[in-house]
Structure formats: C-alpha cells, structure tokens
Image (cartoon, rainbow, N blue to C red):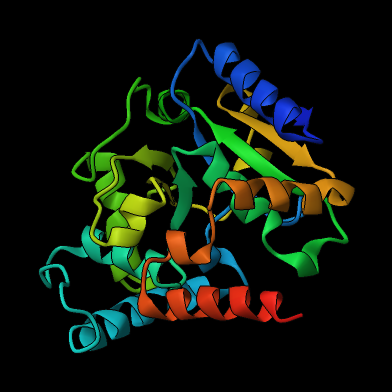
Amino acid sequence: MNPEEYIATDLSTYLSAIVTATRNFDNNTLWWRGQSRKSWSLHPSIYHRDLAKNETNMCVQFRNQAKVRHRDVPDIHDTTSWLFLMQHYGLPTRLLDWSDSPLIALFFAIKNITADDEDGVIYGLSPTDLNFKEIALKGIVGTGNPTARKVFDNAWVNPGEKKDATNILAINTQHVDIRQMVQASQFTIHGINTSLHELDGASEYLVSIIIPREFKEAFRQIINLFHINDSYLFPDLEHLARQIQSLNYSENQ
C-alpha cells in the first residue's frame, strides 16, 4: 500500500497536512525530508549510478585525507561518526538525511529553480514505526544496536566481505558538525538500495506532501520570510559569501 499523499499549495495547507499526518501516527514525532522532484527515489546517494561498488574506497579515501582539511574529525576507528561527517560534506553514503523541522524540509523541496518543471515532495517519516516494522523495536536505535552495527560496518568492507544486513533503520544521530545541529538532522541508514516509499507496508510509517510545481515560487517567498537559506543551513564562510553576493546583486537590478 502506497503512503498517504497530501497536496500543499500554500503555507496553510502545508501546515494542515503536517498536523493531520502527525495525528494519524498517534502524534509521534515525525522526521521530514524534502526533494525537488517527486520522481526521485527515496534512497541514499551511494545507490545512485552504481556507486555502491566503490563505497569502501570512497570512505577510506575521505578518512585518510580529511584531517588536514577539517579541524575536528572523529577518531580513526569511529566509523559511524565518519559516515555522518561524510554525508554532511557531500560524499555518497548509505545514510539518508532527514530533519526534525518540516520548514527545513520544505526549503530543500523548493530551493532548486531548475526543478520547477516537476512537482516537489516532502516525506514525513515515523522513525519508531519504521523500526518496529524492520526489527520489532518501538524506538529509535543507537549506532551500537547489533542490526544497525552490521549495516554501518558494511560500508567499510569489500563486497565479498559484507554481512547479511538489508535493514533500513532510523538511528540516533551523532552530531559531528555544526551543519547537523542547524539543520536539525536525523538519519536513516539503508542496507539495501530499494526506495523507502516502494517497500511493502510503507504506509505504516511514511506519508508524502506534494508541492505542485506552479506553487514552488510562492513557497520560496514564504521560506524567505523565515530566513531559511543556504547561509543559515550551511554556516560556513563560502555560503555566507554567496548569500551576501546574491542579496547585493538583487538590490542592484
């Protein structure tokens, strides 16, 4: 059964969909993820373009070369924290980003102007219901959970050495970078490349809110009123410079 779907055309209908979805999951806290195109799969970037075969090499290369580029890096043996750090700096991993904030998810669903030819989507996930369906545990698992541990470990071993770990789990997030704090980050970790919304029983833990393409620009104006932008969500000097340049360029037009 497909996840329940809502349509949002303005802030009022978006907030209404959020409230209704939350109530339908017994007022459990939901995690949110925005995607610019409804047609995109709901699975991690490591499973795009057959990158999974290079997963271990990419992880090791990143870990070996990150220390001189980043002030605070995890201990070399803390492979779970390394995956969180890699994910937030754009390396394809088996992690999928979510946020506690539906407004931040909305930002990511409508920010990409080049995707205005297609509807956007915000997914709402009940992390406890996902884990209950996967491992009969009504809660969010820690990175030390035996099942989660197998999925994490598979990122660091060669294909022939991977353990039988095909679960998708909502995990307690380790914040290893300020971006994660600002974005109210949460994560699922995926042991398979099947899109989350295509799994049997997805409606038991997932909903979607569609942003029709013709309403994306109006939503951008709303998001700007809340001062949610790249320089806020990516608090580094590069994004600050881009934001200042963009504002001054607009004022001079």
Question: Is 136 situated above or below 147?
Answer: above
Quarter of the image for residue 188 reads top left
Nearest the viewer among 52 and 208 is 208
Q: Residue at x 77, y 80 (%)?
A: 253
Question: Is 50 situated above or below 179?
Answer: below
Quarter of the image for residue 202 reads top right
Question: Is 244 situated above or below 17?
Answer: below
Nearest the viewer among 113 and 203 is 113
Question: Is 63 situated above or below 18?
Answer: below
Residue 157 on image: x %, y %: 30, 70
Residue 231 on image: x %, y %: 47, 66
Furthest residue toward front: 252
Q: Residue at x 71, y 33 (%)?
A: 11
Residue 25 on image: x %, y %: 54, 15
Quarter of the image for residue 83 reads bottom left
Q: Residue at x 32, y 31 (%)?
A: 140
Q: Residue at x 30, y 81 (%)?
A: 62
